[in-house]
Image (tube, helix red, strand yellow):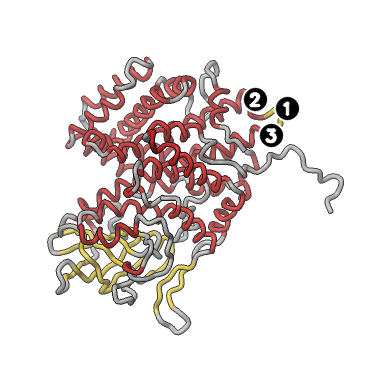
Amino acid sequence: MAGSTHTVTNQPPPLAGYDAFTADRALTAAVDRHTAPDLLDEVRGELAALGRACGSAQVQEWGAQANEHPPGLRTHDRYGQRVDEVDFHPAWHRLLGKGVSAGLTAAWSRPGGHVRRAAAFLVWTQVDAGNLCPLSMTHAAVPALRTDPALAAVWEPRLTSMVYDRELRPARLKAGALFGMGMTEKQGGSDVRANTTAATPLAEDGTYRLTGHKWFCSAPMSDGFLVLAQASQGLTCFLVPRVLEDGTRNVFMIQRLKDKLGNRSNASAEVEFDGTWARRVGEEGRGVRTIIEMVAATRLDCVLGSAGLMRQAVAQAVHHCTHREVFGGKLVDKPLMRNVLADLALESEAATTLALRLAAAYDDGGEQERALLRIAVPAAKYWVTKRCSPVTVEASECLGGNGYVEESQMPRLVRESPLNSIWEGAGNVQALDVLRALQREPSALNAYLQEVGKARGADHRLDAAIKDLLTELADLEGVEARARRLTERLALVLQGSLLVRYAPPEVADLFCASRLGGDAGAAFGTLPHSLDLASVVERARPEA
């Protein structure tokens, strides 16, 4: 029994029992904007259902449990037979099953599939980012497999299935399947052409034996993996199934699991191939070209994942400050805290708006939109993922000491926040990819300029930023050393253009003033105080 001195007051209630989709005004507006009218009721209904699940106390508890009880490696069974399996807490399987049934691997087979999936991905990240890794790779494997119609016919219906089938069985016996990817090796890192895994052809056309290793292989309990290895004609893409057609296990030796900073619920492994059976995907020597669409899709998921983490961090901060009283009033109404919250909300809305615009480009599929993606995806991946860490750290500070305690969920968001900037090519890789697009693909720059030009004349700061960007693009002398700066400006101008066109005036005004006009300091909470900060904070408030 608590003593008389232990009456708890002035503590905010948990942020639970709410609809994480419907409460996100920036996200719902983007879904409305990019979804065909005849699909909108269906899409909003399914996203609201997922949003309610995401905001429920039960599902939030699954996320906590999956991270508190990380996966464990079991190399052998009780009889000494090698099994190479990873054991997960039941909460992991519940989360993964919910993600599959929500269509997070089904974008390629549904009308408006990429926008509805992107919104769901952003929402579901807020429960647990770890289970999004296998969901992302499964989704992204489809365009790579389509280079081989025979493989696609076997695997695509299972990868786009909305049934979670966790048992290791041959593909023909599976109701649904998950895919992973293995490119990185110890000596190569992002330089995948330095890979040394060797592929030796077998008698059956298109089949090989692989010998080598992969330094990072996430979701090692997946049903199949796309990997890169050296064949006689050079680096080639292969499909490695965990279980062969006769029901025997393929050689897939898990040497250890990574002990990671964050993403604790998800298993990332070091794996060895020793005579491992594989099927070639695409032509020999064209491995990077074959797998590049998969990489592009997972890079967009990095943007979506960071946008989801930022949204949850901002929602928690605004919720806390709405209920917390200090110095005779609500914390959210204090001018300095309002400035911080508005600044964080701006970053979150800009990320969400950009991410959904890129998803809409995938749904469109036209030549102009594909050209836009060639620059916009690496630029967004570079910038949005880099903004995630400072946003989550600042949002945690809004909770004071409570934000430093595990029960608040904020430390998990902070630990997760650097990951998307590292996965699928770190910052320099993205910036160099932007340069390649600028130098080799004039249609990509033209598509980008047409997109941002749609907002010309609407805000003088955006107009000036576009003009300055054109000046930078006209001088490519020593451009590699300026690649990060240029990529950052490309992303910010694109975000500004989208917000000017689509966001409420107070959001666009603040963004252009602070991000493009230079009217802000280096830290959050330094916005021009004369603008409408309160409306921006209110727009970001989750409705519990």
Residue in front for this viewpoint, 126 or 388:
126
Q: CA distance from mark 2 to mark 1?
A: 9 Å
Read off the residue under disc 3: 324
Q: Read off the residue under disc 1.
A: 327
Q: Amino acid at mark 2?
A: Lys
Q: Determine the image quadrant of residue 327.
A: top right
In the rendered image, the residue lying farthest to the right is: 4
Q: Percent position (x, y) of residue 220?
A: 39, 64
Q: Which mark is residue 242?
A: none
Between 7 and 499, the one lying in front of the other is: 499
Residue 392 visible somewhere in the drawing:
no
Under mark 3, the amino acid is: Arg
Which residue is outermost to the front?
Answer: 38
Q: Position of residue 237 (x, y in %)?
A: 22, 59
Q: Amino acid at mark 1?
A: Phe
User: Residue drawn 87% across and 46% down?
Assistant: 4
